[in-house]
Amino acid sequence: DTAVSQTPKYLVTQMGNDKSIKCEQNLGHDTMYWYKQDSKKFLKIMFSYNNKELIINETVPNRFSPKSPDKAHLNLHINSLELGDSAVYFCASSQDFLGTSHTGELFFGEGSRLTVL
Amino acid sequence: GNSVTQMEGPVTLSEEAFLTINCTYTATGYPSLFWYVQYPGEGLQLLLKATKADDKGSNKGFEATYRKETTSFHLEKGSVQVSDSAVYFCAGSGAGSYQLTFGKGTKLSVIP
């Protein structure tokens, strides 16, 4: 059983298109995240949701819109894709909000590699 | 704000060599510190952690000790294996921080 699963694993698309990446966790966690990993492996947080409520929204273009229909799902929709959006996007979850628990353990999905041509 | 600095890679070692990957942190208060590992083609997974000064985290032969005086959390392993080849991330979280702050990652390649 995959704890954090995201689809698709690979996505190749043209500039200007709109695409979505889906994420689901079956761990019963309250908090979910989206991270972007660039070609140099640098990880940057994009968004965090706690119990379906947005709690972290880093400086990300508003072409990126997260949606959390319930606390087990956090999807990422990207409008008007640009070349610079090419990266691996990781979904993650934690038992509770890091700011309060300090447990720090994040459970990551396997990543979705987005290539914009 | 919090920041984590780790040594840049890539690091290439022969099997059974000793590994050290340095990590230092800057934070308000005393953060919890972590090492995550990313094997090729996979997401990150927690390797070990320490939540207070002088704590030692250990797992799979890896160790790291939370040193308050030097604000460091260096990762060590006495004898690396080919299967340890991965990217290693140091990270910290703590009071006043709403997120886990990651270092830039260190790629380790172990050759037979």
Image (cartoon, coloured by chain):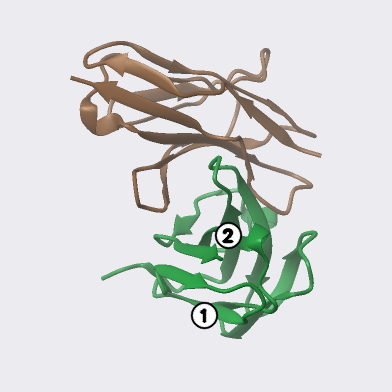
Q: Residue at x 51, y 65 (%)?
A: A114
The chain painted green is: A
B30 left or right of B90? right
Q: Taking A105 as reference, is B96 left or right?
A: right
Q: Residue at x 32, y 15 (%)?
A: B13
Label 1, on which residue? Answer: A73
Residue A40 location in percent, x, y?
A: 56, 40
Q: Which chain is brown?
A: B
Give the percent coordinates (x, y) of residue B85.
Answer: 31, 31
Circle 1: is it few (<14), some (14-19), or many (20+) Cα within 10 Å? many
Q: Position of residue A107 (x, y in %)?
A: 45, 57
For the C terminus of chain A, the quadrant is bottom right
Compare residues A113 and B39 and report the one nearer the observer: A113
Q: Are marks 2 and 1 on the same chain?
A: yes
Q: Is residue A44 above or below residue B54?
A: below
* Image x and y of residue A49, in percent: 65, 71
> CA–CA distance between discs 2 and 1?
23 Å
Q: Which residue is mark 2?
A: A86
Q: Chain of mark 2?
A: A
